[in-house]
Amino acid sequence: MPSLPEGFCSDLCWEIGRPKEHLAACVKWQSKQQQERQARDDAGYLPSYSEATEKKITEVGIQHISRNESHSFAYDAAAAIIAGGRPFSLFEGRRWHYFFTRIKPGWKPPSRAVITRILPEFYQELHGEVFKLISSSEWFNIVFDASDNISGHRIVNVSVQIPDGPAFCWKTFDTGDEQHTAAN
């Protein structure tokens, strides 16, 4: 590629067929961008998702993520949210997008809708693991807990606890609005 005249790189590089690759290799443009980033960082500026992606691309080049790798990342992120009892919207904030862009540009964390679609598959996986733990345990405790839901219906939760382990909520029953006494 012919070298561009002094002072024209950032203006003319957009006319080049592959501007991102050119900018990733252009020392002058990189230096100018680094100075601008440092000034923004010193001022406490948090870049937008697109700015963070551009910054990462120019620093390390374009990284391609396969469809399988992207799905694997989304599944693992969703599993961490679900197992940790975190809100499904956890990764939707601007700072999370910036954080993930710095780690792996080109990958966006899963949205609430994606996590909701992953939930049944993850639930079955986790259910299988819990069932295996309970089945292999020499003994376990069964715990019953009752409370009212927001409709005023009585809810009974059945949990199973293994020795030296956590309690797993196994089943929840909605007993409706009937009155509960020792007789029934």
Image (tube, rainbow, N blue to C red):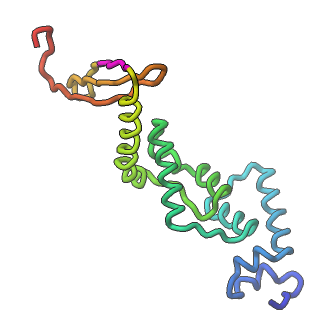
Q: Looking at the rendering, in which quadrant would you find the C terminus?
A: top left
Q: Quadrant of residue 4?
A: bottom right
* Residue furthest left in the image: 183
- Residue 171 as seen in the image, left or right of residue 48: left
Q: Looking at the rendering, in which quadrant would you find the N terminus?
A: bottom right
* Residue furthest top in the image: 182
Residue 174 at x, y percent in the picture: 20, 28
- Of residues 85 and 50, the one nearer the viewer is 85
Residue at the image point whose x is 76% and y is 66% from the top: 59
81 relative to 68, above or below: above
Q: Quadrant of residue 35?
A: bottom right
- Of residues 128 and 86, the one nearer the viewer is 128
Q: Main secondary structure of the magenta part?
A: strand
* Residue furthest right in the image: 6
- Residue 122 as seen in the image, left or right of residue 67: left
Is residue 144 rendered magenta in the image? Answer: yes
120 relative to 8, above or below: above
The part of the chain drawn in magenta is: 139-145
Residue 8 at x, y percent in the picture: 83, 83
Residue at the image point whose x is 39% and y is 29% from the top: 136
- Residue 115 as seen in the image, left or right of residue 55: left
Residue 170 at x, y percent in the picture: 32, 30
Is residue 32 rendered magenta in the image? Answer: no
Residue at the image point whose x is 45% and y is 24% from the top: 166
Total numbered labels placed on residues in the image: 0
Residue at the image point whose x is 61% and y is 60% from the top: 49
Residue 142 at x, y percent in the picture: 32, 19
